[in-house]
Amino acid sequence: MTAEEIQNRDASPVEKHGFVLHVICFPLAAAYLIWTFVPDDILHSLQITYYAPKEWAFFVPTYMFCIFVAIPLLYAAVNILSAAKIDSPLTIGGDSFSRPPPSGCMGSEAIIRPETNGSSVPE
């Protein structure tokens, strides 16, 4: 691509959304840091009197981190609890990938043992 083609190219929606998110996050982060670290006296002298309690500067990131950690754990727990038990009849067959066992396979005869080529394999 030439430089002129790159300049005339329209931005994709992903690029546009990323730019808007970038532009919005910086003022919000700056406001958060100002609210967190600037003492109340200075904020009041700037006529900024309506804001959340300073404790939330600690609580919000802590809650966000806990949620960030808890969601994958809860997702895994729900998947484990919703799966059928290993000895359940529901785990045998029923989908397009299942096939019946070969005829005559019963008990220990169904175990396939690999060739050992004369070497000893502990059982």
Image (cartoon, grey):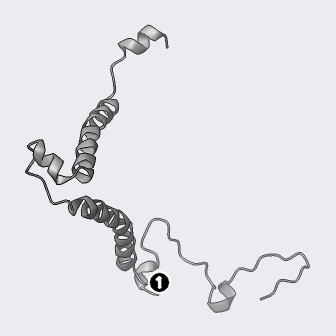
At label 1, counting other C-alpha atoms closer than 10 Å, the crowd grade (few under 14, some 14-19, many 20 or more) is few
State the image coordinates of residue 79 (x, y, percent, origin top left): 37, 72
Near-viewer residue (121 or 2): 2
The extreme top residue here reads 4
Q: Which residue is mark 1?
A: 86
Q: Residue at x 63, y 85 (%)?
A: 105
The C terminus lies in which quarter of the figure? bottom right
SS assignment at label 1: loop
Q: Quadrant of residue 89?
A: bottom left
Q: Does 59 sit above or below residue 13?
A: below
Nearest the camera: 6 or 83? 6
The reply, left or right, for residue 12 in relation to residue 91 is left
Does 9 appear above or below 121? Answer: above
Q: Residue 6 vs residue 112: left or right?
A: left
Q: Residue at x 11, y 48 (%)?
A: 44
Identified by mark 1, the residue type is Ile
Q: Can you give x and y, in whole percent of width and height, for residue 102 in the image?
A: 61, 78
- Residue 116 on image: x %, y %: 85, 77
Query: Residue 93: x and y, percent?
Result: 46, 75
Residue at 47% in and 84% down: 86
Residue at 42% in and 11% down: 5
Name the foreground residue: 53 vs 82. 53
Lateral position of residue 30 relative to residue 8, left or right: left
Check the image and name the residue furthest to the bottom: 107
